[in-house]
Image: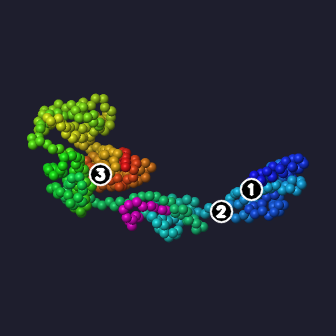
Amino acid sequence: MKQYLLLLAAVLLFANADGQQLNSAEYFFDTDPGVGNGNALVVATGDSILFSTNISTLGLASGFHYLYIRARDNNGHWGLSERRLFYIRAITTAANLSAAEYFFDNDPGVGNANQLTVSSGDSILFSGNISTASLTNGFHFLYTRVEDLNGKWSLGEKRLFYINTIVAASQVSSAEYYFDDDPGVGNGNNLTITGGDTILFVGVIPTGSLATGFHSLNIRAMAADGRWAIAEHRMFYIENTPAIVPPLVAAEFFVNVDTGFGQCGDLVVTPGDSIDFSGIITLGDTAQGIYYLYIRVMDSLNVWSLYERDTFEISNNVGVRVLHSSNQTVLFQNYPNPFNNTTYIEYYLGDPGEVSISISDMLGNLVKQISIVNPGRGKHTIRIDKSLLGEGCYFYKLVSGKFSDTKKMIVIK
Protein backbone atom coordinates (compact mmCIF):
# COMPACT_ATOMS: atom_id res chain seq x y z
CA MET A 1 0.00 0.00 0.00
CA LYS A 2 2.85 2.45 0.78
CA GLN A 3 4.46 1.72 -2.61
CA TYR A 4 1.30 2.67 -4.54
CA LEU A 5 0.89 5.89 -2.55
CA LEU A 6 4.45 6.95 -3.23
CA LEU A 7 4.15 6.17 -6.94
CA LEU A 8 0.90 8.18 -7.16
CA ALA A 9 2.56 11.15 -5.46
CA ALA A 10 5.47 11.00 -7.94
CA VAL A 11 3.16 10.94 -10.95
CA LEU A 12 1.24 13.94 -9.67
CA LEU A 13 4.43 15.89 -9.06
CA PHE A 14 5.71 14.95 -12.52
CA ALA A 15 2.43 16.01 -14.10
CA ASN A 16 2.52 19.33 -12.29
CA ALA A 17 6.14 19.89 -13.26
CA ASP A 18 5.46 19.33 -16.99
CA GLY A 19 2.07 21.06 -16.94
CA GLN A 20 0.20 17.86 -17.85
CA GLN A 21 -3.60 17.89 -17.48
CA LEU A 22 -6.34 15.27 -17.27
CA ASN A 23 -8.34 15.15 -20.51
CA SER A 24 -10.44 11.94 -20.44
CA ALA A 25 -12.03 9.35 -18.10
CA GLU A 26 -13.76 6.01 -18.28
CA TYR A 27 -15.73 3.65 -16.04
CA PHE A 28 -16.53 -0.06 -15.84
CA PHE A 29 -18.40 -2.50 -13.51
CA ASP A 30 -16.82 -5.38 -11.59
CA THR A 31 -14.30 -6.67 -14.19
CA ASP A 32 -11.55 -4.47 -15.75
CA PRO A 33 -11.73 -4.60 -19.60
CA GLY A 34 -8.27 -2.97 -19.81
CA VAL A 35 -7.22 0.70 -19.92
CA GLY A 36 -8.97 2.60 -22.66
CA ASN A 37 -11.61 -0.12 -23.10
CA GLY A 38 -14.06 1.09 -20.42
CA ASN A 39 -17.13 3.28 -20.96
CA ALA A 40 -16.12 6.84 -21.76
CA LEU A 41 -17.13 9.72 -19.53
CA VAL A 42 -17.49 13.28 -20.86
CA VAL A 43 -15.18 15.47 -18.79
CA ALA A 44 -13.55 18.90 -19.00
CA THR A 45 -9.73 19.04 -19.33
CA GLY A 46 -7.98 20.30 -16.21
CA ASP A 47 -5.70 19.59 -13.29
CA SER A 48 -8.57 17.67 -11.64
CA ILE A 49 -11.85 16.21 -12.74
CA LEU A 50 -15.21 16.67 -11.05
CA PHE A 51 -17.76 14.31 -12.55
CA SER A 52 -21.50 14.53 -11.81
CA THR A 53 -24.02 12.61 -13.94
CA ASN A 54 -26.09 9.41 -14.08
CA ILE A 55 -24.50 6.09 -14.98
CA SER A 56 -26.89 3.43 -16.25
CA THR A 57 -26.93 0.11 -14.40
CA LEU A 58 -29.16 -1.67 -16.92
CA GLY A 59 -27.93 -5.18 -17.55
CA LEU A 60 -26.59 -5.69 -14.04
CA ALA A 61 -28.04 -8.57 -12.04
CA SER A 62 -29.49 -8.07 -8.56
CA GLY A 63 -26.81 -8.08 -5.87
CA PHE A 64 -23.56 -6.28 -4.93
CA HIS A 65 -21.38 -4.66 -7.65
CA TYR A 66 -18.33 -2.42 -7.94
CA LEU A 67 -18.16 0.80 -9.99
CA TYR A 68 -14.60 1.74 -11.11
CA ILE A 69 -13.59 5.16 -12.54
CA ARG A 70 -10.12 6.23 -13.81
CA ALA A 71 -8.69 9.25 -15.64
CA ARG A 72 -5.98 9.82 -18.33
CA ASP A 73 -3.68 12.82 -18.89
CA ASN A 74 -2.75 14.37 -22.26
CA ASN A 75 0.41 12.22 -22.37
CA GLY A 76 -1.73 9.05 -22.42
CA HIS A 77 -0.93 8.03 -18.85
CA TRP A 78 -3.88 6.39 -16.98
CA GLY A 79 -4.37 6.83 -13.24
CA LEU A 80 -5.31 4.14 -10.75
CA SER A 81 -9.04 3.30 -10.48
CA GLU A 82 -11.40 4.82 -7.92
CA ARG A 83 -13.83 2.15 -6.66
CA ARG A 84 -17.31 2.30 -5.12
CA LEU A 85 -19.47 -0.62 -3.87
CA PHE A 86 -23.25 -0.53 -4.51
CA TYR A 87 -26.24 -2.86 -4.50
CA ILE A 88 -28.80 -3.60 -7.25
CA ARG A 89 -32.28 -4.68 -6.22
CA ALA A 90 -35.10 -5.38 -8.59
CA ILE A 91 -38.17 -3.27 -7.76
CA THR A 92 -41.48 -4.85 -8.59
CA THR A 93 -45.02 -3.59 -8.14
CA ALA A 94 -46.50 -5.06 -4.97
CA ALA A 95 -49.32 -7.51 -5.58
CA ASN A 96 -52.46 -7.61 -3.46
CA LEU A 97 -52.61 -10.02 -0.56
CA SER A 98 -54.90 -12.93 -1.40
CA ALA A 99 -54.64 -15.55 1.37
CA ALA A 100 -53.60 -16.09 4.99
CA GLU A 101 -52.90 -19.03 7.27
CA TYR A 102 -51.99 -19.75 10.89
CA PHE A 103 -50.30 -22.46 12.92
CA PHE A 104 -49.27 -23.11 16.53
CA ASP A 105 -45.68 -23.63 17.74
CA ASN A 106 -44.22 -25.71 14.83
CA ASP A 107 -44.23 -24.55 11.19
CA PRO A 108 -45.79 -27.16 8.85
CA GLY A 109 -44.44 -25.30 5.80
CA VAL A 110 -45.86 -22.46 3.72
CA GLY A 111 -49.30 -23.27 2.37
CA ASN A 112 -49.73 -26.25 4.71
CA ALA A 113 -51.10 -24.43 7.77
CA ASN A 114 -54.69 -23.66 8.78
CA GLN A 115 -56.44 -21.30 6.36
CA LEU A 116 -57.89 -17.97 7.47
CA THR A 117 -60.85 -16.46 5.62
CA VAL A 118 -59.75 -13.00 4.45
CA SER A 119 -60.60 -10.40 1.80
CA SER A 120 -57.98 -9.69 -0.89
CA GLY A 121 -56.35 -6.24 -0.76
CA ASP A 122 -53.26 -4.16 0.01
CA SER A 123 -53.62 -5.15 3.66
CA ILE A 124 -55.56 -7.75 5.61
CA LEU A 125 -57.47 -7.26 8.86
CA PHE A 126 -58.56 -10.53 10.44
CA SER A 127 -61.12 -10.59 13.24
CA GLY A 128 -62.44 -13.95 14.38
CA ASN A 129 -62.01 -16.93 16.67
CA ILE A 130 -59.17 -19.44 16.36
CA SER A 131 -59.76 -22.73 18.11
CA THR A 132 -57.19 -23.82 20.71
CA ALA A 133 -59.02 -27.04 21.66
CA SER A 134 -56.12 -29.26 20.55
CA LEU A 135 -53.50 -27.47 22.67
CA THR A 136 -52.26 -28.63 26.06
CA ASN A 137 -52.04 -26.39 29.12
CA GLY A 138 -49.01 -24.08 29.06
CA PHE A 139 -47.36 -21.46 26.86
CA HIS A 140 -47.79 -21.56 23.08
CA PHE A 141 -46.99 -19.41 20.03
CA LEU A 142 -49.56 -18.40 17.42
CA TYR A 143 -48.07 -17.63 13.98
CA THR A 144 -49.93 -15.95 11.09
CA ARG A 145 -48.66 -15.13 7.58
CA VAL A 146 -50.10 -13.93 4.26
CA GLU A 147 -49.66 -14.74 0.58
CA ASP A 148 -49.89 -12.30 -2.37
CA LEU A 149 -51.27 -12.89 -5.85
CA ASN A 150 -47.76 -13.77 -7.07
CA GLY A 151 -47.66 -16.72 -4.68
CA LYS A 152 -45.09 -15.12 -2.37
CA TRP A 153 -45.51 -15.69 1.37
CA SER A 154 -44.61 -13.16 4.05
CA LEU A 155 -42.66 -13.88 7.23
CA GLY A 156 -44.77 -15.16 10.14
CA GLU A 157 -46.22 -12.78 12.75
CA LYS A 158 -45.79 -14.34 16.23
CA ARG A 159 -47.83 -13.97 19.43
CA LEU A 160 -47.24 -15.73 22.79
CA PHE A 161 -50.24 -16.91 24.83
CA TYR A 162 -51.07 -19.26 27.69
CA ILE A 163 -53.61 -22.11 27.86
CA ASN A 164 -55.17 -22.93 31.23
CA THR A 165 -58.14 -25.28 31.49
CA ILE A 166 -60.92 -23.82 33.62
CA VAL A 167 -63.19 -26.39 35.18
CA ALA A 168 -66.40 -25.90 37.11
CA ALA A 169 -65.84 -25.74 40.85
CA SER A 170 -67.14 -28.63 42.92
CA GLN A 171 -67.91 -28.63 46.63
CA VAL A 172 -65.25 -29.16 49.27
CA SER A 173 -65.53 -32.64 50.76
CA SER A 174 -62.51 -33.09 53.05
CA ALA A 175 -59.51 -31.30 54.57
CA GLU A 176 -56.15 -32.15 56.12
CA TYR A 177 -53.27 -30.45 57.91
CA TYR A 178 -49.56 -30.99 58.41
CA PHE A 179 -46.65 -29.25 60.08
CA ASP A 180 -43.55 -27.99 58.25
CA ASP A 181 -42.89 -30.75 55.67
CA ASP A 182 -45.53 -31.79 53.13
CA PRO A 183 -46.20 -35.57 53.34
CA GLY A 184 -48.04 -35.46 50.00
CA VAL A 185 -51.69 -34.78 49.18
CA GLY A 186 -54.02 -37.12 51.05
CA ASN A 187 -51.32 -38.10 53.55
CA GLY A 188 -51.81 -35.28 56.08
CA ASN A 189 -53.79 -35.35 59.31
CA ASN A 190 -57.55 -35.44 58.71
CA LEU A 191 -59.76 -32.53 59.81
CA THR A 192 -63.44 -33.07 60.57
CA ILE A 193 -65.43 -30.65 58.42
CA THR A 194 -68.85 -30.20 56.88
CA GLY A 195 -68.76 -30.34 53.06
CA GLY A 196 -69.90 -27.35 51.04
CA ASP A 197 -68.78 -24.49 48.78
CA THR A 198 -66.57 -23.25 51.64
CA ILE A 199 -65.46 -24.74 54.95
CA LEU A 200 -64.96 -23.17 58.37
CA PHE A 201 -62.85 -25.17 60.80
CA VAL A 202 -62.97 -24.36 64.51
CA GLY A 203 -61.11 -26.76 66.77
CA VAL A 204 -57.89 -27.69 68.51
CA ILE A 205 -54.85 -29.04 66.63
CA PRO A 206 -52.34 -30.81 68.91
CA THR A 207 -48.74 -29.62 68.79
CA GLY A 208 -47.29 -31.92 71.47
CA SER A 209 -44.91 -33.64 69.03
CA LEU A 210 -43.27 -30.41 67.89
CA ALA A 211 -39.91 -29.15 69.17
CA THR A 212 -39.37 -25.65 70.55
CA GLY A 213 -39.02 -23.08 67.78
CA PHE A 214 -40.80 -21.78 64.71
CA HIS A 215 -43.11 -24.08 62.75
CA SER A 216 -45.48 -23.85 59.82
CA LEU A 217 -49.08 -25.09 59.97
CA ASN A 218 -50.46 -25.97 56.54
CA ILE A 219 -54.13 -26.73 55.82
CA ARG A 220 -55.65 -27.73 52.48
CA ALA A 221 -59.01 -28.95 51.24
CA MET A 222 -60.12 -31.46 48.64
CA ALA A 223 -63.06 -31.04 46.26
CA ALA A 224 -65.62 -33.77 45.58
CA ASP A 225 -63.90 -34.52 42.25
CA GLY A 226 -60.63 -35.35 44.04
CA ARG A 227 -58.75 -32.13 43.30
CA TRP A 228 -56.70 -30.68 46.17
CA ALA A 229 -56.34 -26.96 46.83
CA ILE A 230 -53.08 -25.12 47.50
CA ALA A 231 -52.25 -25.25 51.21
CA GLU A 232 -53.11 -22.31 53.49
CA HIS A 233 -50.02 -21.46 55.51
CA ARG A 234 -49.57 -20.03 59.03
CA MET A 235 -46.33 -19.54 60.97
CA PHE A 236 -46.28 -20.09 64.76
CA TYR A 237 -43.81 -20.58 67.59
CA ILE A 238 -43.52 -23.44 70.13
CA GLU A 239 -42.04 -22.54 73.50
CA ASN A 240 -41.37 -24.63 76.58
CA THR A 241 -44.02 -23.24 78.92
CA PRO A 242 -44.37 -23.84 82.64
CA ALA A 243 -47.09 -26.13 83.94
CA ILE A 244 -49.07 -23.07 85.02
CA VAL A 245 -49.59 -20.57 82.23
CA PRO A 246 -48.81 -17.08 83.56
CA PRO A 247 -51.56 -14.46 83.23
CA LEU A 248 -51.51 -11.78 80.57
CA VAL A 249 -50.67 -8.38 82.04
CA ALA A 250 -50.14 -5.94 79.14
CA ALA A 251 -50.93 -5.32 75.49
CA GLU A 252 -49.63 -2.99 72.78
CA PHE A 253 -50.33 -2.10 69.16
CA PHE A 254 -48.51 -0.70 66.14
CA VAL A 255 -49.48 0.26 62.60
CA ASN A 256 -47.43 -1.09 59.68
CA VAL A 257 -43.98 -0.74 61.33
CA ASP A 258 -42.92 -2.71 64.43
CA THR A 259 -40.84 -0.47 66.72
CA GLY A 260 -39.90 -3.35 69.06
CA PHE A 261 -41.34 -5.22 72.05
CA GLY A 262 -42.62 -2.79 74.68
CA GLN A 263 -41.93 0.20 72.42
CA CYS A 264 -45.33 0.44 70.70
CA GLY A 265 -48.65 2.03 71.66
CA ASP A 266 -50.00 0.87 75.04
CA LEU A 267 -53.48 -0.64 75.35
CA VAL A 268 -55.28 -0.37 78.69
CA VAL A 269 -56.27 -3.94 79.63
CA THR A 270 -57.28 -5.94 82.68
CA PRO A 271 -54.74 -8.71 83.51
CA GLY A 272 -56.02 -12.27 83.30
CA ASP A 273 -55.84 -15.57 81.46
CA SER A 274 -57.22 -13.79 78.41
CA ILE A 275 -57.63 -10.18 77.40
CA ASP A 276 -60.66 -8.64 75.77
CA PHE A 277 -59.91 -5.13 74.56
CA SER A 278 -62.68 -2.76 73.58
CA GLY A 279 -61.77 0.85 73.10
CA ILE A 280 -60.48 3.59 70.81
CA ILE A 281 -57.00 3.52 69.26
CA THR A 282 -55.71 6.99 68.37
CA LEU A 283 -53.71 7.10 65.13
CA GLY A 284 -52.97 10.83 64.98
CA ASP A 285 -52.61 12.64 61.64
CA THR A 286 -52.62 9.67 59.24
CA ALA A 287 -52.95 10.02 55.46
CA GLN A 288 -55.57 8.22 53.39
CA GLY A 289 -54.71 4.65 52.45
CA ILE A 290 -54.74 1.01 53.55
CA TYR A 291 -52.93 0.05 56.77
CA TYR A 292 -52.14 -3.01 58.90
CA LEU A 293 -52.99 -2.95 62.62
CA TYR A 294 -50.95 -5.33 64.80
CA ILE A 295 -51.77 -6.21 68.44
CA ARG A 296 -49.80 -8.43 70.84
CA VAL A 297 -49.86 -9.22 74.56
CA MET A 298 -47.30 -9.83 77.30
CA ASP A 299 -47.58 -12.26 80.24
CA SER A 300 -46.34 -11.82 83.81
CA LEU A 301 -43.00 -13.39 82.84
CA ASN A 302 -42.44 -10.53 80.37
CA VAL A 303 -42.82 -12.86 77.39
CA TRP A 304 -44.51 -11.28 74.38
CA SER A 305 -46.88 -13.18 72.12
CA LEU A 306 -46.95 -13.19 68.34
CA TYR A 307 -49.08 -10.39 66.94
CA GLU A 308 -52.63 -10.52 65.62
CA ARG A 309 -53.04 -8.57 62.38
CA ASP A 310 -55.99 -6.93 60.70
CA THR A 311 -56.39 -4.52 57.78
CA PHE A 312 -58.18 -1.20 57.73
CA GLU A 313 -58.62 1.75 55.40
CA ILE A 314 -58.61 5.49 56.05
CA SER A 315 -60.64 7.48 53.55
CA ASN A 316 -62.10 10.98 53.41
CA ASN A 317 -65.30 9.42 52.11
CA VAL A 318 -65.92 6.67 54.68
CA GLY A 319 -63.51 7.52 57.50
CA VAL A 320 -61.92 4.40 59.05
CA ARG A 321 -63.19 0.94 58.11
CA VAL A 322 -61.93 -2.60 58.67
CA LEU A 323 -61.62 -4.22 55.27
CA HIS A 324 -62.15 -7.79 56.48
CA SER A 325 -65.63 -6.95 57.73
CA SER A 326 -66.67 -5.02 54.61
CA ASN A 327 -67.24 -5.91 50.98
CA GLN A 328 -63.92 -4.37 49.92
CA THR A 329 -61.51 -6.58 47.92
CA VAL A 330 -57.86 -6.12 48.92
CA LEU A 331 -54.58 -7.45 47.49
CA PHE A 332 -51.90 -7.70 50.17
CA GLN A 333 -48.12 -7.60 49.85
CA ASN A 334 -46.61 -11.05 49.46
CA TYR A 335 -44.66 -12.47 52.38
CA PRO A 336 -41.82 -13.01 52.77
CA ASN A 337 -40.52 -10.38 50.35
CA PRO A 338 -37.82 -10.62 49.04
CA PHE A 339 -37.82 -14.45 49.05
CA ASN A 340 -35.49 -17.21 47.88
CA ASN A 341 -37.68 -20.29 48.14
CA THR A 342 -41.43 -19.84 48.66
CA THR A 343 -43.66 -16.80 49.11
CA TYR A 344 -47.39 -16.38 49.73
CA ILE A 345 -49.81 -13.95 48.09
CA GLU A 346 -52.81 -13.09 50.23
CA TYR A 347 -55.99 -11.35 49.14
CA TYR A 348 -59.32 -10.58 50.70
CA LEU A 349 -62.30 -11.04 48.40
CA GLY A 350 -65.22 -8.79 49.22
CA ASP A 351 -67.63 -10.10 46.59
CA PRO A 352 -67.70 -13.71 45.32
CA GLY A 353 -66.61 -14.12 41.71
CA GLU A 354 -63.84 -15.33 39.46
CA VAL A 355 -60.32 -14.28 40.44
CA SER A 356 -57.39 -13.96 38.04
CA ILE A 357 -53.80 -13.53 39.28
CA SER A 358 -51.05 -12.91 36.74
CA ILE A 359 -47.29 -12.65 37.33
CA SER A 360 -45.17 -10.67 34.85
CA ASP A 361 -41.50 -9.78 34.64
CA MET A 362 -40.08 -6.23 34.47
CA LEU A 363 -40.57 -6.19 30.66
CA GLY A 364 -44.25 -7.03 30.94
CA ASN A 365 -43.88 -10.63 29.75
CA LEU A 366 -46.44 -12.97 31.31
CA VAL A 367 -44.73 -15.61 33.47
CA LYS A 368 -47.66 -17.25 35.28
CA GLN A 369 -51.45 -17.00 35.03
CA ILE A 370 -53.70 -18.35 37.78
CA SER A 371 -57.49 -18.46 37.42
CA ILE A 372 -59.71 -19.31 40.40
CA VAL A 373 -63.44 -19.90 39.93
CA ASN A 374 -65.69 -18.59 42.73
CA PRO A 375 -63.27 -18.85 45.70
CA GLY A 376 -65.89 -17.24 47.98
CA ARG A 377 -65.86 -14.10 50.09
CA GLY A 378 -63.05 -13.82 52.61
CA LYS A 379 -59.30 -14.15 52.90
CA HIS A 380 -57.35 -16.45 50.58
CA THR A 381 -53.68 -17.39 50.13
CA ILE A 382 -51.73 -18.57 47.08
CA ARG A 383 -48.33 -20.22 47.34
CA ILE A 384 -45.66 -19.26 44.80
CA ASP A 385 -42.50 -21.35 44.47
CA LYS A 386 -39.16 -20.01 43.24
CA SER A 387 -39.05 -22.84 40.70
CA LEU A 388 -41.57 -20.85 38.63
CA LEU A 389 -39.41 -17.70 38.64
CA GLY A 390 -35.83 -16.67 38.03
CA GLU A 391 -33.96 -14.15 40.14
CA GLY A 392 -35.24 -10.57 39.75
CA CYS A 393 -38.26 -8.30 40.19
CA TYR A 394 -41.79 -9.31 39.23
CA PHE A 395 -45.25 -7.76 39.33
CA TYR A 396 -48.33 -9.67 40.42
CA LYS A 397 -51.78 -8.41 39.53
CA LEU A 398 -55.18 -9.47 40.89
CA VAL A 399 -58.35 -8.90 38.88
CA SER A 400 -61.84 -9.74 40.20
CA GLY A 401 -64.90 -8.03 38.78
CA LYS A 402 -64.18 -4.30 38.66
CA PHE A 403 -61.30 -4.61 41.16
CA SER A 404 -57.69 -4.57 39.94
CA ASP A 405 -54.46 -4.04 41.88
CA THR A 406 -50.76 -4.69 41.24
CA LYS A 407 -47.84 -5.17 43.64
CA LYS A 408 -44.13 -5.95 43.26
CA MET A 409 -42.22 -8.94 44.60
CA ILE A 410 -38.50 -9.78 44.48
CA VAL A 411 -36.82 -13.18 44.02
CA ILE A 412 -33.25 -13.51 45.34
CA LYS A 413 -30.68 -16.31 45.33
Name which of mark 3 and mark 1 comes first in the sequence: 1
- Its colouring scheme is rainbow
Quadrant position of residue 373: bottom left
Q: CA distance from mark 3 to mark 1?
A: 69 Å
Q: Is residue 213 left or right of residue 3?
A: left
Identity of the residue furthest to the left in this view: 244
Q: Which callout, 3 or 1, points to the residue nearer the camera?
A: 1
Q: In 3D space, how far apart are the residues under numbered discs 1 and 2 (Cα atoms)?
A: 29 Å
| Local secondary structure at mark 3 | strand
Q: In what element is the residue under mark 2? A: loop
Asked if residue 239 lies in the magenta stretch, the reply is: no
Residue that label 2 marks = 92
Residue annotated with mark 1: 83
Q: Quadrant of residue 303?
A: top left
The residue wearing badge 3 is 382
Q: Residues within 10 Å of mark 2 (few under 14, many from 20)?
A: few
Read off the magenta span: 131-144
